[in-house]
Image (cartoon, rainbow, N blue to C red):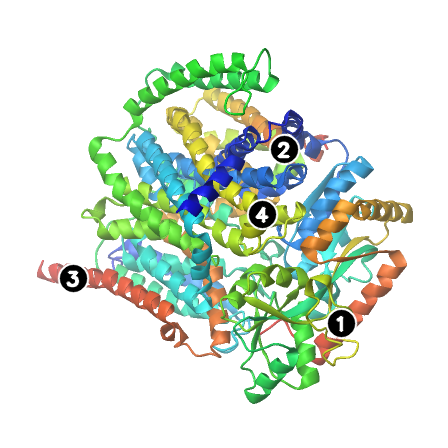
Amino acid sequence: MIELLSNLAIGFDQALTATNIFYCFIGVLLGTAVGVLPGLGPVATIAMLLPITFGLPPVSALIMLAGIYYGAQYGGSTTAILINLPGESSSVVTAIDGYKLAQQGKAGVALFTSAVGSFFAGTVATFLIAGFAPPLAEVALKFGPAEYFSLMVLGLAASVALAHGSIVKALAMVVLGLLLGTMGQDLYTGAPRFNFGLVELADGIDFVALAMGVFGIGEIIRNLEDSTERKLVYSPISNFRYFIIGPVLLAVAGTLEYLDIGPSFNFLGHNPNVLSMVVAVPSLGLFGYHLSHLMKDLVPTKEELKSIIAPILRGTVIGSFLGILPGGGAILGSFGAYTIEKRISKTPERFGKGAIEGVAAPEAANNAGAQTSFIPMLTLGIPSNPVMALMIGAMIIQGIVPGPNVINDKPELFWGIVASMWLGNFLLLVLNLPLIGIWVKLLTVPYRVLFPAIIAVCCIGVYSVSNNPFDVYWMAIFGVIGYFLIKLDCEPAPLLLGFVIGRLLEEYLRRAMLLSRGDPFVFFQRPISAVLMILAILALVIVLIPSVSKKRDEAFREETK
Amino acid sequence: MPRISRRTMLATSAAFALTPSIIRAQGAPITIVVPFPPGGSTDALARVLQAGMQEKLKRTVVVENKSGGAGAFGAAAVAKSAPDGNSILVTFDSHAVIPSILEQPPLDVEKDLVPVFLVGTAPYVLAANAERPFQTFADVVKASKEKPGSVKYASVGIGTLGHLAMTLLAKKTGIELTHVPYRGGGPAMSDVLGGHVDLIAGSAALVTTQLSGGKLRAIMQMGRERLPALKDTQTAIEAGFPDFETLAWWGVFAPRGTPQPIIDSTAKAVKEILTEPATATRLRDTQQMTLILAEGKEFNSFFTKQVSLWGQVVKENNIRATGG
Amino acid sequence: MPGFIKNPKDFFAGLLFLVIVAIFGWGLRELPIGTAFRMGPGYFPMVLLIILTGLGVAILVNGLRTSGEPIGMIPWRGLALITFPIIFFGATLKGLGLVASLGISVFATTLASREWNILYAVATTVVLVVASWLIFIKGLGLPISLRGPWIGGY
């Protein structure tokens, strides 16, 4: 415990320098921005900024890049809630109930829940990393190909809970997603698969094009069905000017501090500028005042607040654990958290129609997973996703050898990054709570203006993924397919989960079979894998039995009529 | 506690403000194509070169990651672009295996591209999970002879040099090893550290970083001489395989037909960047790289030797991009 | 609608899945399947296709047996006025540049609205083109030109 505190002290000593706060802020700001805009994800942004980090001290560089990563996770949820555009695989789940809430005029509540849930989860996950990173990394290593395969199967079996309609259709959508995921090159041999003679399909379908199509475009087409176009209900924000004055004054204070005009004084070893402090103090007051106003408008009701606490806690636990697994566990975090909430809820029928728990749990899981996915990278030098691979690249460029020695050789780097995560989460909360007002305001724009805007953003965003017109065509095609699937009561969320997991599932299956020399019982012989497999089978049996008996009832009723 | 460095902050702010304008700058920028996803060793090298070239050539330089097809897609993209020095390829040892491993390679690596600069080499290293009883390669041979196929090794993919080297060693000793391919060093290493696979044939950088963790043991290195970081590990030559050498290498290529002066000036710039002591040290520490810094002809002869050496291994062992 | 289809939503969903199975099944022909020990590129997709065939048939049969709601109206006009402008945008962005390509696409999509009038359409188009220019080209530095080579740009 004492060691933990002294380690965290080292970390905060690093993270709380003005320079590093600045870079952390720039990171989360940029991250939020690219997260909100579909297409341009954290990988592209970080890759673009790598050369800039060259001249920075290693700690600052990594703090900024980490900020982009979790900022983007966060920004993605905003568009998922507001306009049904999940820019990242992790926000697919948030879109299900978040968007429904927005349609009911509760976008503010959903965004608030997402912000607070993320912050709480981020805080817990940070302390988890600080206290237990090395032993947790050990746990992660216990997961071999067989365990990952079973975990993915469990995730898929549980994902039928994402749909609130027919279970058989949900299963078919999962399998269709898996199938779409196999398009492109074969993982091992590089053999082209299902490209139907098109060079443009050599790399398969891009996730962003698929998600924007079936969610964003499909939804727009559906809204055009109504003769009176969809009007989003919104709760107006009182005293909008307070949102502007506080941040503006804070920016003025920052500029003054930056330019260092006039005298400065000594404060705990720092030398803040007198003038800037004179502006900063009242601006913070104003900020607090408008925050309190905001709360009045956006804070959930007591019942809602009560109903999100437990989901946030559960989401944090699930997300933290799955995030540790470098082989793609983090993807399952938000899906798993949603499924569990729906399962244990007394009113599961509300899910998919605007249940606040359906936003709280996955958002917490998502952010907790984003934090704990640093564990394998920081303690073992093993990247768990492309963003982590880029962070390792940034370390190499900085001349740091990533691996198990970082924690001992560069404690200030390790603990600095850990402490900056908490700081980054705090900054995200401060940045985003006031923004909620602006976002909700955005929804007051008439739909006939909003939908061309969504299309424009989707088009440019999808195009920018790889400057390939075919991605845009695919988005249009999937928009149509997505629309018809929704019309046929086939919900798209399980499809997207299948698509995201497909490649991993196949990779682990093939590797596990290679290791077991073709013996399929390997999944039941290894203890962790066996438990996961049994859970998966149970999950499927539980959901299928009621539907079978229900169908029997229906058939029976039919006959008696 | 360091006081805020205004200069750094100013520089970064300026850099942020400038990024868009740099990309939009009039005239085509120099594009460094990396045929692998960002984050790997080749990508890191390319970004070191990007920053250096920006400064040395006073031109805008962008890095583009075009991955797929074992690095062939990116290479083909460069081969097809105009030979005006504005697009160059920074690639890795797998480049030499493209003609033999792919059924329909999208380019002829020897004809469509000209070698510009060989940056450096690093030996491949065979390492074992520390709980396995393997101290030397002879132990692996013994265990495999007792139970053919029982020893499993990880590589970063079918047809990568780690896979080919192990195939060659297995053939020379008459043993059967089970090959488990991965996509990238991270996942492969993860499974070896976790004990799911026995051995890993990977680059020196991948292996050496894990040794301090105590979960991995290097059992043989495939360079001619022992690396400073692996001075207690025998080389393949010492282990009784004369002339056996498997080297990772990093090189720069340009499209065929690029005018010689442009090639020369590119090579000169790259050489200047890499001979800066700080950069050289970084590459040695992080990649275990031995800088070679060979230009045109010398690089060409190295490259053609690599192509024929591994091409022969692929052909003789009928390694196809199908099956495990 | 033929009388034997009792639940059109299920019937057509099942049919759709089976059509997809047929398309992918055709693509599977050339892929080596391999063995369970050394799976080839075709093994995993083959398993998926078998499962999807089963699920598709189950859904289709359900559409014949149990009754359900009709599919309802399909806004063909809106569908076309959303899809084609997007494809137009993809096809012309490189050639026409952002202003013309996005301008035409956005203007065309506004036609999908039932509350269309010229003032609103022009205003929306102008605002979106300018905003996209500011955000994506000025702000994020995406390599997209404003005026493409087809109309005398670069």
Q: Nearer the viewer, residue A487 or A147?
A: A147
* Element class at badge 1: loop
Q: Give the CA separation, mark 4 to mark 2.
A: 35 Å
Q: Quadrant of residue C90 in the image?
A: top right
Residue bearing mark 3: A555
Query: Which of the two discs, 3 and 2, sits closer to the camera?
Result: 2
Name the residue at the bottom extreme: B146
Q: Are marks 4 and 3 on the same chain?
A: yes
Q: Are marks 1 and 3 on the same chain?
A: no
* Element class at badge 4: loop
Residue A410 got which mark?
4
**Res. B158 in view:** yes
**Res. A488 in view:** no
Residue A513 in the image, given as x and y percentages of width and height: 47, 74
Q: Amino acid at mark 3?
A: Ala
Q: Nearer the viewer, residue A229 or A362?
A: A362
Q: Chain of mark 2?
A: C
Query: Which of the two discs, 1 and 4, sits closer to the camera?
Result: 4
Q: Give the CA separation, mark 2 to mark 1.
A: 46 Å
Residue bearing mark 2: C141
Q: Amino acid at mark 4?
A: Lys
Residue bearing mark 1: B245
Image quarter where the C terminus of chain B lies is bottom right
Q: Amino acid at mark 2?
A: Gly
Residue A482 in the image, given as x and y percentages of width and height: 41, 48
Image quarter where the N terminus of chain B lies is top right
Q: Give the CA separation, mark 1 to mark 4.
A: 34 Å
Identify whether B180 is placed above or below A285.
below
Query: Which of the two discs, 4 and 3, sits closer to the camera?
Result: 4
